[in-house]
Image: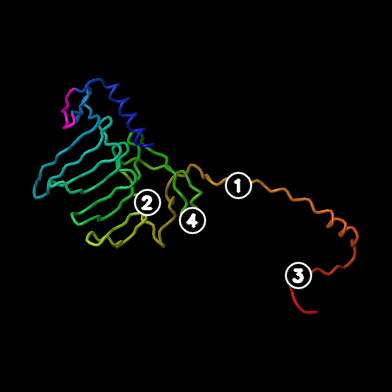
Amino acid sequence: MRTLLLSLILISVLSAAGQCKTYRLGEKRDTLDCVDTKGMKQGRWIVRVPPLRGEPGYEEEGIFINNRKEGVWKRFNTMGDPLAVETYKWGNRNGKCLYFTIAGIEREENWRAVNPDKVFDTIDVVDPKDPNKYEKVIVKNEGRSLKHGVWRYFNPNTGALMQTEKYILDQLQTDEAPSVTQGMTKVGTDTARTKAAAVPEKPKPREVLEFEKKNAGKKTRVRDGRTGG
């Protein structure tokens, strides 16, 4: 569903931007590295970064919408081995991101993108004790993504899980950690769970009504499961 929506947005953006000012054709004759008439990157790009000051070079590919990374981006070393699979929203990391060494997966991160077009953004924070309850809080946009969700660290050679951390809006959650919304501006609390309607009391059977009427005011012995006299 998200892939379809992203494709529709991309088609809309390219249609609105008109023809690319500069671009190149890929091996399948598809349009790559488009810069529109407004000087903004659009569509599918393959970005090559050469080695610099001892840092290895790499290549990454994904989609730009109005100069911002959007959706899934993949990064490879110069030999074609995967280094990262990241997801973006508004040009910031959002959701699950995976990082690899040549041996295997090294870590899994989770992020929450903040809309860069807003000075403040409203985010739903799930109550860790009740997944059906959440609070709306206002966070200041500092031009970056927030650590949000479970982070996992692996041994790349064996794939064994080595460490797990949980973040909520950049706050590492521990037994001593403060409330997830402490120090934040709250704008309301919602409950996703709908309260069940009160079940009307069932009418008593005719036999029970007759028994109660017949023995009204009398002491009756009721079996309660106990044995003995």
Q: Residue at x 41, y 62 (%)?
A: 175
Give above or below for 176 relative to 51. Answer: below
Q: Residue tagged by mark 4?
A: 129
Query: Which circle, 1 or 4, is nearer the viewer?
Result: 1
Where is 10 relative to 143, above or below?
Answer: above
What is the CA distance from the residue labelled 3 to the residue labelled 4? 38 Å
Relative placement, left or right, of 115 versus 198 is left
Name the residue: 84% across, 53% down.
Answer: 206
Amino acid tagged 2: Gly
For badge 3, the amino acid type reads: Asp
In the rendered image, which quarter is residue 211 located in?
A: bottom right
Q: Which of 75 and 165 is in front in this view?
A: 75
Please report whichever mark, 1 or 4, sits nearer to the chain's N-terminal start: 4
Q: Residues within 10 Å of mark 2 (few under 14, many from 20)?
A: many
Instruction: Confirm whether the magenta stretch covers residue 96.
Output: no
Going by the picture, which residue comes out furthest to the left? 53
Residue range in magenta is 21-28
Q: Name the residue under label 1.
A: 195
Does dot 3 land on a helix, a strand or a loop?
loop
Q: Is residue 85 left or right of residue 191?
A: left
- Identify residue for label 2: 149
Q: Residues within 10 Å of mark 4 (few under 14, many from 20)?
A: few
Between the C-alphas of marks 2 and 3, the distance is 51 Å
Image x and y of residue 152, in percent:
31, 56
Q: Which of marks 2 and 3 is nearer the N terminus?
A: 2
Q: Residue 88 carries which label?
A: none
Mark 3 or mark 1: name the one nearer the start of the chain: 1
Q: In the drawing, what numbered circle is on residue 224? A: 3
Pair 3/1: label in front: 3
